[in-house]
């Protein structure tokens, strides 16, 4: 699944570590999602979208 997580993270001027801490995941998880190596669980996808105050579809797309 393609995503725009890196773009949204950059717009908020967050490091991967800072975002990981906010979401309660590891930095490696954020790296893997950004590189399209890992699809987050539905719960994590919604948590990410809620953090950035956007719809899940704005960040993740097929």
Image (tube, helix red, strand yellow):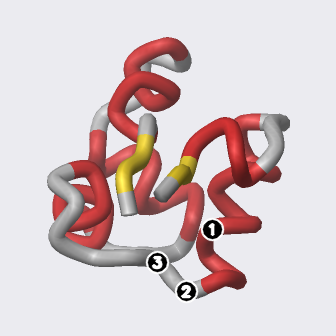
Given the current orientation, which residue lies at the most extreme front position? 62
Report crowding for label 2: few under 14, some 14 to 19, many 20 or more residues within 10 A (C-alpha): few
Q: Is residue 24 above or below residue 41?
A: above
Residue at image point 68% right, 37% down: 58
Are the residues flagged by discs 2 and 1 in contact, CB closer than 8 Å?
yes
Gap in Å between the C-alphas at discs 3 and 1? 6 Å
Q: From the viewer's side, name the closer residue of 31 and 60.
A: 60
Image quadrant in which the N terminus is located: bottom left
For the residue carrying disc 3, how many other residues have a C-alpha within 10 Å: few (<14), some (14-19), or many (20+)?
some
- Which type of secondary structure does the marked residue at label 1 adopt? helix
In this rendered view, identify the residue nearer to me: 59 or 19: 59
Q: Identify the secondary structure beneath mark 2.
A: loop
Seen in the picture, residue 41 relative to 59 is either above or below; the reply is: below
Name which residue lies at 70% across and 48% down: 57
**Picture coordinates of residue 44, whole percent (x, y):** 61, 76
Check if mark 3's residue and mark 1's residue have beta carbons within 8 Å: yes
Q: Give me the C-alpha separation between circle 3 and circle 2.
A: 4 Å
Q: Where is residue 9? Give x, y as percent.
A: 44, 30
**Residue highlighted by disc 2:** 41
Q: Which residue is mark 1?
A: 45
Name the residue: 43% across, 36% down: 4
Q: Where is 46 relative to 6, above or below?
A: below
Instruction: Provide residue 37's location: percent of width, then percent of height.
Output: 16, 70
Q: Is residue 20 left or right of residue 53?
A: left
């Amino acid at each position: 699944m393609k995503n725009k997580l890196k773009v949204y993270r950059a717009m908020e001027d967050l490091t991967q570590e800072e975002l990981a801490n906010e979401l309660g995941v590891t930095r490696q998880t954020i790296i893997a999602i950004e590189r399209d190596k890992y699809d987050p669980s539905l719960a994590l996808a919604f948590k990410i979208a809620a953090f950035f105050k956007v719809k899940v579809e704005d960040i993740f797309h097929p």
